[in-house]
Amino acid sequence: MPSRIVGAHDVSFGFSALALVAVVGMAGPLLASVPRLRIPVVIGELAVGLLIGRTGFGLVDAGDPTFSLLADIGFALVMFVVGTHVPIRDATLRSSIPGAVVRAILVGAVATVFAVGLASVFHTGHAAVYAVLMASSSAALALPVIQSLGIDGPSVQGVTAQIAIADATSIVLLPLVINPERALTAAIGAVLIALAAVVLFVVLRWFDRRGLRKRLHRYSQRHGFALELRINLIVLFALAALAVSTHVSIMLAGFALGLVVKAAGEPRRLTRQLFGITEGLFGPLFFVWLGASLQVRELGDHPAYILLGVGLGVGAVLAHCAGRLTGQPLALSALAAAQLGVPVAAATLGTQNHLLSSGEPSALMLGALLTIVVTSVASVIAAHRQREQPA
């Protein structure tokens, strides 16, 4: 859950601030629309958040309770959408799982070696956190890139499965390793959320078999009630409340619900509705909030953390390139290194609970940004090489 950081100006977050956030959030789509740059939307949103927040002009207060609550909702929705991006129902994807598990384990082993080295060099004691970060992948970033470029084939199915496995595993592990003192409570909370997700999946399947879900869909569409969206939001907020009460990140609640909805079969109408409220408002608001809450100037006060951020980014890319040892194309290995949700959650949780040193959250985000740059380049290379292959 986003931290309550007091910004440079103690100004109440009202409609004027909300309008400002919505306007500057347009920087994401504008930068992403430049063909030669291919900058992910979230990068532009993070950048303008830095500009108007603690690092920049202090035009918004990231610690304002209203702003933080809206960012919490955005975080949960973003992770919900991430879960729906995991192609869990794809039969060809399931056949790629054994090889993907092997690569994910290999990446995790290499990442652990790098993490121990970085924690030792910078004396942070956060080797486990760094290992989870560098071994993670971002389904929310990488899978849409793969789909938009139209690349496919067995190797692509394999890397898709690998990304899904790494993303899900890292999201579960992060709350356990970032605060070992609460690891047992977090583990119990994670189990409770998982059980709730399983129960929800069983209920949805029962509704499907009896035709009740389809009847609800038609009734909602005929009367314009948006009942599916309302029900999903109720469940999402209930799971988020459970996560908060058991000291688990709300990212796990959102991700678990996203997986359930995807596994049960996501209606196209619900997809459009979720896309509208997440990408149109709450998602950009969250990433602007995150940029506004980071104090990148702290890196100037602790220049060694700049090297830590670079080390995390380079280490993540090198760890994922270990997949080349299993015959995976190098471009796809680098593409799998994309990080977003896990570093965001680590920076958020670490700041909220004062678990990270001053400047360390910014170092985590710097490392993530480096992986995104590499992923952007690797995706273009992968698409180019596939076009060059004979039909």
Image (cartoon, rainbow, N blue to C red):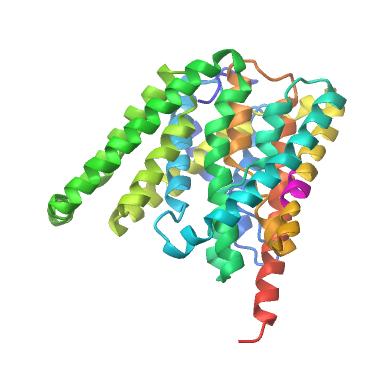
Residue 299's x, y, as percent? 80, 28
User: Along the line of sight, which residue is nearer the eye, 25 or 253?
Assistant: 253
How far across and down, in percent of the image, does residue 38 sit? 66, 61
Q: Is residue 46 above or below residue 58?
A: below
Q: Is residue 42 magenta?
A: no
Identify the residue at horizontal 48%, vertical 42% (top origin). 283
Q: Nearer the viewer, residue 7 or 333?
A: 333
Q: Is residue 354 left or right of residue 241?
A: right
Whether residue 29 can be seen here: no
Q: Is residue 130 left or right of residue 216?
A: right
Q: Residue furthest bottom?
A: 391
Give how far across and how far down residue 267 sits, in percent: 29, 56
Residue sitting nearer the eye, 327 or 55: 327
Q: What residue sits 47% from the left and 65% below the top?
A: 92
Q: Viewed as shown, does residue 214 lie left or right of 122?
A: left
In what quadrant of the picture does the C terminus appear?
Answer: bottom right
Magenta part of the chain: 316-320
Q: Quadrant of residue 33?
A: bottom right
Q: Residue at x 69, y 36 (%)?
A: 365
Res. 297 visible in picture: yes
* Left or right of 56 on screen, residue 275: left
273 to 175, vertically: above or below:
below
In the image as oriented, which residue stretches furthest toward the top?
181
Q: Residue 153, position in %: x, y?
A: 57, 71
